[in-house]
Image (cartoon, rainbow, N blue to C red):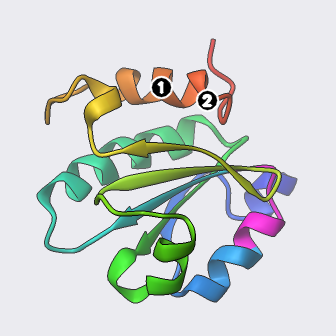
Amino acid sequence: KEWLSKGHGEYREIPSERDFFQEVKESKNVVCHFYRDTTFRCQILDKHLTVLAKKHVETKFLKLNAEKSPFLCERLRIKVIPTLALVKDGKTHDYIVGFTDLGNTDDFTTETLEWRLGCADIINYR
């Protein structure tokens, strides 16, 4: 219940960099997708993250428009879109950059992404 009140259980967009810091502060595990509207692969990732957000309420799933967050992208050294920043206890713990870790293919499965997030210990993967 507490997790749901903090926005867990759904995959949603946050409007600004300032919101990112607030969201990360109030949750132990956060997956943040840095995306761009014009990047097709971001839409592929959106589809998988929507499924995983409902399944893994222990983790908060967010997305942030990289073009509207230059400070954060520079600070987190995000150069490739899409990038998932995996944040644990307020610190960036790991990154999933592009689709390299997901089999280097556009048609990877949700399970593949789930496994990779489990390897980073950002979700409870069994």
The image quadrant that residue 125 belongs to is top right
The image quadrant that residue 66 belongs to is bottom left
Which amino acid lies under the numbered mark 1 shown in the image of this protein?
Arg
Are the residues tagged 1 and 2 within 8 Å (C-beta)?
yes
Question: Are there few (<14), some (14-19), or many (20+) residues within 10 Å of tag 2?
Answer: some
Question: Are there few (<14), some (14-19), or many (20+) residues within 10 Å of tag 1?
Answer: some
Secondary structure state at the residue bearing disc 2? loop
Range of magenta residues: 23-29
The image quadrant that residue 10 belongs to is bottom right
Is residue 28 positioned above or below 109 on the image?
below
Q: Residue at x 48, y 38 (%)?
A: 52
Q: Position of residue 64 (x, y in %)?
A: 45, 73
Cα distance between the residues tagged 1 and 2? 7 Å
Is residue 55 toward the left or the right of residue 50 in the image? right
For residue 59, which numbered disc appears in the image?
none
Q: Residue at x 48, y 75 (%)?
A: 74
Q: Position of residue 20 (x, y in %)?
A: 64, 75
Q: Residue at x 73, y 41 (%)?
A: 58
Which amino acid lies under the numbered mark 2 shown in the image of this protein?
Ala
Is residue 69 positioned above or below 125 on the image?
below
Q: Position of residue 1 (x, y in %)?
A: 84, 51
Secondary structure state at the residue bearing disc 1? helix
For residue 116, which numbered disc appears in the image?
1
* Quadrant in the picture for the C terminus: top right
Q: Is residue 77 magenta?
A: no
Q: Position of residue 9 (x, y in %)?
A: 62, 50
**What residue is pinned by disc 2?**
120
Give whichever of 16, 54 is nearer the camera: 16
